[in-house]
Image: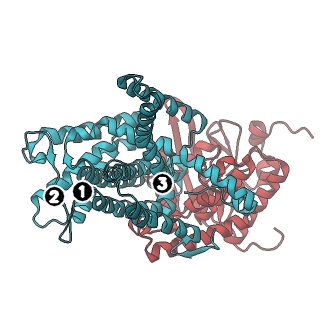
Chain colours: A red, B cyan
Amino acid sequence: MVEARRFPIGEPILEVKNISLRFGGVRAITDTSFNVFRHEIRAIIGPNGAGKSSLLNCINGIYKPQEGTIALNGEVLDKISPNIVARKGLSRTFQNLALFKRMSVLDNILVGRKLHMSANFLSVALRLPEAVREERENRAKCEEIVEFLEISHIRDTPVGRLPYGLQKKVELGRALATEADILLLDEPMAGMNVEEKRDMCRFILKVNDEFGTTMVLIEHDMGVVMDISDNVVVLDYGKVIGDGPPDEVRADRAVIDAYLGVAHD
Amino acid sequence: MNTNVVFMGYTRSDLTNLVVVLALALLVIPLTVESDYWYASILIPWLCLALAAVGQQIVMGYAGQLALGAAGFMAAGAFACFNLILRVPYMPFPVALALSGLIAAAFGVLFGLPSLRVRGIYLMVATLASQFFIVWMIDKFGWFKNYDTSGIITAQDIVIFGKTFTTPLEMYLVVVVVVAVLTIFAVNMTRGSTGRSWMAVRDMDIAAESMGISLLRTKLQAFAISAFFCGVAGALFAFTYLKSLEPVAFDIKLSFKILFMVILGGLGTISGAFIGAAFILLFPVVLNSLGNNVFHGAIDATIISAAEQVVFGVLIIVFMIYEPLGMAKLWENVKQRFNFKRAPTAALSKTQAT
């Protein structure tokens, strides 16, 4: 990123304010606030059990936090469920792969186009011209994504048969197909080898650069985090203990103590 | 896949298959099969039950909702059709058939509601309510049976555009046309965005929801469409096969039969519904004639019929162990093996077919 960005970082797109989430007596997240800015790549890091995934699940509407508000594009999401949040322009991937296992790669990605397809079941059943046209256009769109992610050779394979790294790619493809303003990626590189990680980073940067998509990603590989993110939020025991550019966060005393540990070198 | 689409999103092979099947059903069979037994006792019930199995396939094989109660919706459709023709003057049979489907669909939505809360085997138990409630309701309130006390009501004649369809061949043609049209609709839905939403809910509901799919709408839609198919199938079953209406014909045994058709045929394939229905219907007939011809009465008939059940049960178990994806998958494997010899690339790109 030597040249100027095509989509400079802008105003907050996602505002998390004083979120608290409890499961019975367990406090998963306590009074957490941070902003994600338009067009940035934001990493969320923290030790295991710090509440990172729970936080994404709150933003996405799977969990309902007991306190606090989440605003997307300046609009406070009050009655949130995942499908309503999706309609407002937010999409995501999951930590433990949540693909449609018996469907082909292309069909998985086509499900991501759901919100761009409006034909009802009757026009689909009758193959009315509008339904046929819509299907053709969205298929073409998905072919582009498949091409972009370099997975054309497996487009008709049921995803359940694919190796892990490829499944992760398909899941990214499905999220990209939504053309959401903001993507939440829950450990997109977990369990990948170096090469696959490098590929994944390339795709994330490319998407951010070409479409200006805001990315929020949870990642454990510090090298990756420092390389690709514009800002980093550090969580520990459900609390924000650091928030800022990677270099600043890396130098922060509290962060070092909690997460990075004492420097070895 | 996209390159050989020739018409309305269908590929050349889709259209070839369609033409072959329709020619077989509408020309070859009517011209060659003369025996009424074949129409009245094999082809008509097979098509009717296959249509109900398509309905079961939609809710279970595609939308992944373990529902058990197809026969309840069939009863709703059958008695709705009877009452519509009885009570509405000049009610044409095709319209009555479609309305019966819609009435069954309304029941489908109602009994699909538990799917929003429970899943799996618990949903299966909850959906049994449709089976028991609908049949009980028809039995309990005389109005549905037009206050007939004999328990068996004769179905009205099928009249379409002034022509009465009475012979087995004529009835067969009515059934074929209805089943063909609805099956094409089902194939279109399962291959289009509607079916993808169902399958997404089946495979990973939380991800489906995160892609903007409303679970409530998608599940209830699947239940409604499934019940529509079952309702129409039930009306056809009563009017062309049983030629009478009695609630006991739609008991839980029939629901289980339809469930087995779908499981044996192969979950998540429309063709599986037809193959499974053929297997379940024909197998007892084959076993029976085999028993009679091989043993020539050396063994008591009651023992043969008991053995039939045992063999049938064993076969189901064996089948489930060795090919859990059903007979449609078996057929697919055979086809692929032949394709592979001829053109390896074609076989590889055909990893899945509906």
Q: Which residue is mark 3?
A: B270
- Position of B192 with respect to A54 (left or right) is left
**The disc numbered 1 marks a residue on which chain?**
B
Q: In this orientation, does residue B49 appear?
A: yes
State the image coordinates of residue B327 (x, y, percent, origin top left). Answer: 54, 45
Please report contact status of discs 2 and 1: CB closer than 8 Å, yes or no.
yes
Viewer-closest of B214 and A254: B214
Packing grade of label 1 (10 A; few <14, some 14-19, many >=20) is many
State the image coordinates of residue A173 (x, y, percent, origin top left). Answer: 66, 60
Q: Residue at x 52, y 52 (%)?
A: B200
What is the C-alpha distance between the residues marked 2 and 1? 8 Å
Viewer-closest of B249 and A36: B249
Q: Mark 2 or mark 1: which comes first in sequence?
A: 2
Please report contact status of discs 3 and 1: CB closer than 8 Å, yes or no.
no
Viewer-closest of B136 and A258: B136
- Position of A248 with respect to A22 (left or right) is right
Secondary structure type for disc 2 = helix
What is the C-alpha distance between the residues marked 3 and 1? 22 Å
- Position of B315 with respect to A128 (left or right) is right
Amino acid type at image mark 2: Leu
